[in-house]
């Protein structure tokens, strides 16, 4: 029943052709402009070219934005005037909720994979082991979907939950240093980037996968993403019961 629900939820998301195209074309445009602006002549401390420096953070960053799909769909199905439709479904509400999360994860992974393959084939970006890259997209997307789901579950006013979602995205992009705004050199912020920020955790894995060394840091980052997912699932189960009680 869960798989069938995921199938129909994913089909519903894929019907938004314009939004789907924008989630691919916009980041690719950003990667193209910034990658060529930096140029292949510039190489960072890891030996990456300009295009490789830009591609990773942009593609991973858009996995964070993908959480809005979960938030919008859950709000429409569970907390709007259309929620009466759920009464006719032959399974519990929590199964429908997690089918939305799973379909959103698959939807975002599909977007990310298309961009990864495009930058590899067209711009020659060396991603290293592609399996690791796809795994990063999966883990970062799961964390983001769960964050947005928790927001819409905990906060009854949707506008406030939506604002919290925007805050989540821009805060972690800022802390990762991608908004061209100086990040204060504070030990606590460094700790957040190393253990909590899904963008920097994902980028750490991608960097070490690209250069093929120090995989210990990559394993640590993947472990932290998995731990964050587990914590978020527990919180969703606790608050979800209260919301539907």
Image (spheres, helix red, strand yellow):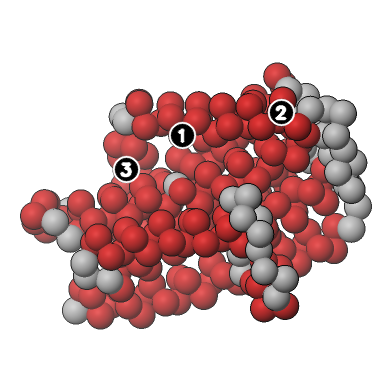
Mark 1 neighbour density, 10 Å: few (under 14) some (14–19) many (20 or more): many
- How far is disc 1 from disc 2 in space, using C-alphas? 22 Å
Mark 3 or mark 1: whose residue is earlier in sequence: 3
Q: Position of residue 18 (x, y in %)?
A: 35, 26
Q: How many marks?
A: 3
| N-term mark: 3 or 2 | 3
Q: SS at mark 3?
A: helix
From the top left corner, tell me how far across and down residue 57 is, in percent.
Answer: 65, 46
Q: Are marks 1 and 2 in contact (CB under 8 Å)?
A: no
Label 3 vs label 2, nearer the camera: 2
* Residue named by callout 3: 9
Front tag of 1 and 2: 2
Pointer 1: what residue? 23
Task: Find residue 79 and report its image quarter.
Answer: bottom left
The quadrant of the rendering that contains the C terminus is bottom left
In the displayed structure, would residue 240 be above or below residue 164? below
Q: Would you identify the image quadrant in which residue 185 lies?
A: bottom right
Q: Position of residue 203 (x, y in %)?
A: 70, 52
Q: Residue 177 placed where, x, y %?
A: 66, 55
* Label 3, residues with CA under 10 Å away: few <14, some 14-19, many ≥20: many
Determine the residue positioned at 90% across, 41% down: 47
**Mark 2, residues whose alpha carbon is within 10 Å: few (<14), some, or many (≥20)?**
few
Among the 4 quarters of the image, the one containing residue 219 = bottom right
Up/down of 39 relative to 100, above or below: above
Residue under label 2, please give it.
Answer: 37
| Mark 3 and mark 2: Cα distance apart in space | 39 Å
Q: Earlier in the sequence, mark 1 or mark 2?
A: 1
Residue 59 can be seen in this image: yes
Look at the numbered disc 2 and give the secondary structure of its residue: helix
**Looking at the image, residue 155 lies above or below residue 116:** below
In this rendering, which labeled residue sits more in front, label 3 or label 1?
Answer: 1
Along the horizontal axis of the image, is 8 left or right of 138?
A: left
């Amino acid at each position: 029943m869960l798989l069938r629900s995921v199938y129909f939820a994913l089909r519903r998301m894929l019907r938004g052709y314009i939004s789907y195209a924008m989630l691919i074309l916009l980041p690719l445009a950003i990667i193209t402009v910034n990658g060529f602006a930096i140029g292949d002549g510039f190489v960072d401390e890891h030996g990456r070219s300009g295009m490789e420096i830009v591609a990773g953070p942009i593609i991973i960053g858009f996995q964070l934005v993908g959480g809005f799909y979960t938030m919008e769909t859950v709000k429409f199905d569970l907390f709007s005037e259309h929620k009466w439709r759920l009464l006719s479904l032959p399974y519990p509400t929590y199964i429908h909720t997690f089918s939305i999360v799973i379909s959103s994860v698959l939807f975002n992974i599909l977007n990310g994979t298309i961009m990864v393959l495009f930058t590899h084939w067209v711009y020659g970006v060396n991603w290293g082991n592609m399996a690791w890259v796809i795994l990063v997209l999966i883990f970062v997307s799961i964390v983001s979907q769960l964050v947005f789901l928790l927001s819409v579950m905990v906060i009854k006013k949707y506008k406030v939950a939506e604002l919290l979602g925007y805050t989540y995205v821009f805060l972690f992009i800022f802390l990762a240093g991608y908004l061209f705004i100086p990040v204060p050199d504070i030990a606590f912020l460094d700790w957040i980037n190393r253990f909590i920020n899904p963008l920097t955790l994902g980028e750490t894995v991608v960097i070490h996968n690209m250069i093929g060394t120090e995989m210990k840091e990559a394993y640590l980052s993947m472990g932290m993403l998995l731990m964050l997912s587990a914590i978020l699932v527990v919180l969703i189960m606790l608050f979800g019961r209260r919301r539907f009680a």
